[in-house]
Image (cartoon, rainbow, N blue to C red):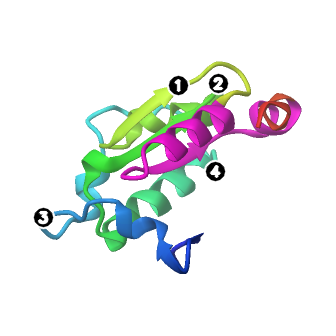
Amino acid sequence: MAETITEGPGTIEALSLVPKAEAKQSMKDFKSDQEVRWCPGCGDYAVLAAVQGFMPDLGLAKENIVFVSGIGCSSRFPYYMNTYGMHSIHGRAPAIATGLASSRRDLSVWVVTGDGDALSIGGNHL
C-alpha cells in the first residue's frame, strides 16, 4: 500500500510521483552482476531475494529506485541490486535517505541497515 501525503485540500500517493517502468520487469532485472558475499546461512540472502522478488510488482523504473546503506554486512545490499545505491557513514543512512527522499520526490528511497548501524548509532541522527 502506498504512503499518502496530505497537501492542501487533497492527498496524493507518494509512489505515484515515481516514474513507472516502460516494460514489464522480473526479479532478474533487479539482480546486479555482483557475486553475493554473505556467510552461509545468513538471513540477508532471504531479505535480498524477497526484495528482488517484489520490486517488479511495484512497477517503478529502476532508474528511480535508490538503496541507501550504512556499514556492516547488511550494507552490501546496494551492490546486489540493479538500481542506484550508496553507502553512507556509520549510522547516517536514515538521515541521508530522509534528505534524499524529501528533496527528490521522484525517487523511491529505501534504507538497508543492521542493528548496530541503525539502533546503536543511527536513530540519533534522524
Q: Residue at 32% across / 43% down in the picture?
A: 83
Q: Looking at the picture, how far across and down is residue 115, in whole percent?
A: 79, 39
Cα distance in 3D space between marks 1 and 2: 7 Å
Q: Are there few (<14), some (14-19), or many (20+) residues within 10 Å of tag 1?
A: some
Residue 116 in the magenta stretch? The answer is yes
Residue type at the position of mark 4: Gly
Q: Looking at the picture, how far across and down is residue 112, in whole percent?
A: 60, 43
Q: Residue at 58% across / 37% down in the picture?
A: 99
Q: Looking at the picture, how far across and down is residue 50, in whole percent?
A: 49, 63
Q: What residue is shown with label 4?
A: 43
Closest to the camera, between mark 4 and mark 1, is 1
Q: Which residues are magenta?
A: 93-120
Q: Residue at 39% across / 39% down in the picture?
A: 80
Cα distance in 3D space between marks 4 and 1: 20 Å
Q: Is residue 4 above or below residue 124?
A: below
Secondary structure beneath label 3: loop
Secondary structure beneath label 2: loop
| Nearer to us in this view, 26 or 101 | 101
